Image: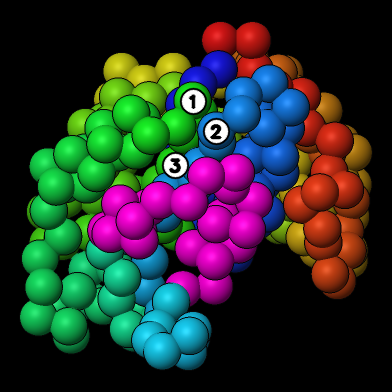
Amino acid sequence: MRACFVAGTDTGVGKTLVSAALLHALASHYPRVVGMKPVAAGTVPHGSGWANDDVLALRAASTVQVPPELDNPVLLPDPLSPHLAARHAGVAIDIAHIVSCYQQLSQLADAVVVEGAGGFLVPLSDDRTGADLAQALALPVLLVVGLRLGCLNHALLTLEAIQARGLTLLGWVANRIDPAMQAQDDNIAYLQRRLGVPLLADIPYSPAPDAMAITLTLPDR
């Protein structure tokens, strides 16, 4: 596997954690791996400017340094849904430009992990969503399921959205983000039957998860 799009069942389910773990796993096979966060909303002070926490985590897990305008072409100050954050910033999220940035990254690295924003159908504008971006990139999808009440519905709806756009689901990751959730193993077993693709990792709950400590099986395609 040389490239994939990491989607989540919702925001806050661990896409960045899984993307970083995937980068670490790929680094054992390829000398140059890089993460990409096409659209990031919310910034923190960094050096003499600003950056996004998720973007910084992906850069830390990458093995090649690239221009910031390539691995994070859209950086928005406000921690809002991308379409609202873009509106507040007075910018338009250009999917064609993001695709061009990805193509340039793919020339600079042997493997690229693209992390989506929020859930798969998160709005990027009044009429475009993260699913449209994934479709334009035409990459296979890795789905991160945050285990909490409602995740079965979210996972199956996301699967339908992925398939409706003609995209391939490579595999999925179970992330146990809610230690109080009951019947977690039963939920995982149900999704293993329904999603029909390999479970690449089962991440235990941790208040401070470490991407380097995650054992993640790489998809075979």
Q: Residue at x 81, y 49 (%)?
A: 212
Q: Which residue is labeled 2 in the image?
A: 32
Q: Nearer the viewer, residue 7 or 196?
A: 7
Dividing the picture into quadrants, the one containing residue 1 is: top right
Magenta segment: does it hold 54?
A: yes
Q: Is label 2 in a helix, a strand or a loop?
A: loop
Range of residues picked out in magenta: 52-73
Lateral position of residue 98 relative to residue 2, left or right: left
Disc 3 residue type?
A: Val
71 drawn magenta: yes
Q: Which residue is mark 1?
A: 110
| Spot occupied by residue 89 in the image (x, y as percentages of width and height) | 17, 83
Position of residue 207 measured from the top left corner of the image (x, y, whole percent): 86, 71
Q: Say which residue label 3 marks.
A: 114
- Alpha carbon distance from label 3 to label 2: 15 Å
* 25 vs 4, nearest the viewer: 25
Residue occupying the point 68% across, 21% down: 29
Badge 1 amino acid: Asp
Q: Is residue 201 above or below residue 96?
A: above
Q: CA distance from mark 1 to mark 3?
A: 13 Å
* CB within 8 Å, label 2 to label 1: yes
Q: Amino acid at mark 2?
A: Arg
